[in-house]
Image (cartoon, grey):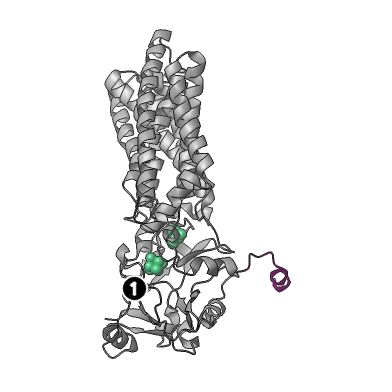
Amino acid sequence: MREKHFWAWPIASYLFLGGLGGGMTILATVFDLFFNKGDVFALALLVAAACVGLGCFFLIFELGRPLQFWRVFSAQKAILTFGAWMLLILIGVNAVNFSFFTGWFPWSGMAGLQQVVAGIDLVLATGVVLYTGIMLSSLKARPFWNTPALPVLFTVSGLSTGAAADSLLAGIWPFAGTAEEVASVHEALHTLDIVLVVFELIVILLYVIMMYTSSNPTAKRAASRWLSGSFSASFWGGLVFVGLVLPLGLYALGGAAAGLLAPVLAIIGGIFLRFLVVYSDDRRLFTGEECYWERLPKGDEAFMEAWE
Amino acid sequence: MTRYAMVMDTRRCIGCHSCTVACRTWNELPTDMIYNPVLTDGPVGVYPNVHMNHMPLICMHCDNPACVGACPTGASQQDADGIVWVEDAKCIGCKACIQSCPYNARHMNHELGVAAKCNFCKDRVREGKEPHCVKTCHQRARIFGDLDDPNSDVSRLVNSLATVRLLEELDTDPQVYYIIGLGGQG
Ligand code: SF4
Ligand code: SF4
């Protein structure tokens, strides 16, 4: 009768979607501000806002009292409050940024203003991507999370899934330019994603090895679950092979089909990563604690039913 | 000033779980919630020198509580006398405080959708009574009082005996002090 995981799939989904939406926005605005390719990425901005919005929905749905969610904006210093504000503003700014590219609004042609909005968007998206990792890494009670390497890992994954999603969406409506322009963006994004995926592969392996060799027995136990225990199929098969190695191979192979499949697999890798991390919420147990909780009734015993 | 604290004399605890039951009854907790479990280690040793160690747990009412800083709504708070508690009306059940507590002192109350924890029976304590678990402990293994009062039982014990605090290395500055006997854990 004891919860194994206080945070489960809704939080993992939110962390994935927040990282994805943030990463997509970062790359879209960077390509806009520094390479003048904003219009190719217009749709990506809108989809990124939708991803973050869906993530927020999971966050709210997961609360004990969802209708009270607005209280999250009320504390002064909590990381969570700060993050909630950033998520909310990012959705709005992304939508505004997108509106410049539609031609529907009186302000659509104002290029100078759009660049300012894109700049704000970039800062916010960077904040959101960093925040998801910083939030978990601030929890001293959870040794597998409590390391500055976690924000690094989440940021790299947010960027690599963002690059993958951006490449799937680049050049679709409302973009009206040439096919060559889109092709050159695709090429740039694929090269970028190769670099990011290689980097992520290195970071994730170092992370797990660092935890496995840690002097903290709780962190070590969680890491050994990844390497050779109950999480090993998801880790080696899902995250490392399907989510990182396979996309790398496909990107290297080149071709239209590979260019479509590789980003999808990279995005799936991002999902595996968040789930693996969220379910590694091990706390250091006191001697006798495990057996204490195990001996409690589970709720389906005959005497429990008779009592209720 | 007042600084409430508790001493657990594990030499006296016999692992009877009376405090657990008393707490659940007094606070009318749902069946799946326990604020103050009593852990048992053992039997350890070789016959005829075997013994069991019992360790009562509770919220440590930390001086630097991880839970309060993690709360995004201000529902988790600490009073001037050190008592850490949750204001139900403000809690949204986000579980950040539960994840931040190294002592597993916080639990979800699924009936209300809020985080819940031991509050040192603050309503009793401020009327001059003892927390219910302390009052119930017939072995007097749980001792409660004001650490800032040099004549209180807790300050006498803490200042005269070697005591241990749990997971001190995490900087939470827990205010529950364990007197360890017969090779119990620290
Ligand atoms: S034991 Fe946990 S719930 Fe209690 S004050 Fe410390 S951190 Fe907060
Ligand atoms: S569950 Fe309630 S008390 Fe705990 S951090 Fe969230 S809002 Fe605060």
Residue A112 lies left or right of residue A194; in this view the side is: left
Q: Is mark 1 within 8 Å of ligand 1?
A: no
Q: Nearer the viewer, residue A143 or B150?
A: A143
Q: Is residue A80 above or below residue A124?
A: below
Q: Quadrant of the C terminus of chain B?
A: bottom left
Considering depth in this image, is B170 or A178 the residue closer to the camera?
Answer: B170
Instruction: In the rendered view, tell whether residue B34 sits above or below residue B9.
Output: above
Q: Residue furthest front?
A: B47
The amino acid type found where label 1 is placed reads Arg
- State which quarter of the image contains the N terminus of chain B: bottom left
Residue at x 35%, y 23% (from the top left corner): A192
Q: What residue sits 32% from the left and 37% below the top?
A: A126
What residue range appears in magenta? A297-307
Label 1 neighbourhood size at 10 Å, few (<14), some (14-19), many (20+)?
Answer: some
| Chain at tag 1 | B
Q: Is residue A259 above or below residue B51?
A: above
Observer able to see residue B91: no
Could you tell me residue A159's position as x and y percent?
Answer: 37, 32
The residue to which callout 1 is attached is B165
**Residue at image location 29% in from the left, 88% down from the top:** B156
* Closer to the camera in the image, A141 or A249: A249
